Amino acid sequence: MKPFSLTDFVIESNRIEGIERTTTKQVTATAKFLTLPRLTIDALLELVSVYQPGAQPRFTRGLNVQIGNYFPSVGGPLVKARLQSLLENIIPCRDAYEMHVEYEHLHPFTDGNGRSGRVVWLWRMGGIDAAPLGFLHHFYYQALKHSNKR
């Protein structure tokens, strides 16, 4: 079996969203993001601008979204504060699974949350070498582990 590469990860992440086209720019932006010593809102804004041009951070009142039957908290300054807290506590307090679930529930952008959330997950995992099975395979086993804790 061939090793799972960063390009494979970006392709998988796009396909989860029903996107069949992966660009070199996406892979390059993901590689750059994964080298960061710590995550910041500005780094996320840059990443999301590559994955989903035109997506906005939901830091302004009225930038509300609905995902299927799920309604994340309303847009506004609290979204920014919660995202900042998540990023500041990503290493000491959160495993990759818990962090990803919290990020997706927050849904900090108007679009591009799934793909950016998976890149944040990969960063928290320690990069592509720590996730050789890809997102779906690893996340499945992480979900099982967390369900056993209940």
Image: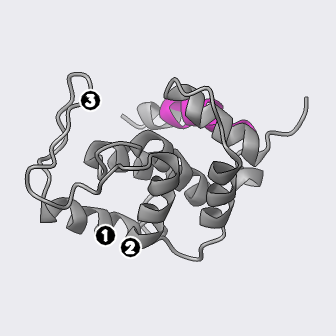
Q: Amino acid at mark 2?
A: Glu
Dividing the picture into quarters, in which one does residue 42 lie?
A: bottom left
Spot occupied by residue 107 in the image (x, y as percentages of width and height):
29, 46
Q: Which residue is mark 1?
A: 84
Q: Which residue is mark 3?
A: 67
Q: In the rendered image, which quarter contains the N terminus?
A: top right
Point 45% across, 56% down: residue: 49
**Segment tinted magenta in the rendering:** 133-144
Spot occupied by residue 47 in the image (x, y as percentages of width and height):
50, 58
Q: In the rendered image, which quarter contains the C terminus?
A: top left
The mark that comes first in sequence, 3 or 1, is 3
Can residue 89 be spotted in the picture?
no
Dot 3 alpha-carbon crowd within 10 angstroms: few under 14, some 14 to 19, many 20 or more: few
Q: Amino acid at mark 1?
A: Gln
Alpha carbon distance from label 2 to label 1? 6 Å
- The nearer-to-camera label among 2 and 3 is 3
- Residue 127 drawn above or below residue 21: below
For mark 2, give the secondary structure: helix
Given contact means CB atoms under 8 Å apart, are the residues at marks 2 and 1 in contact?
Answer: yes
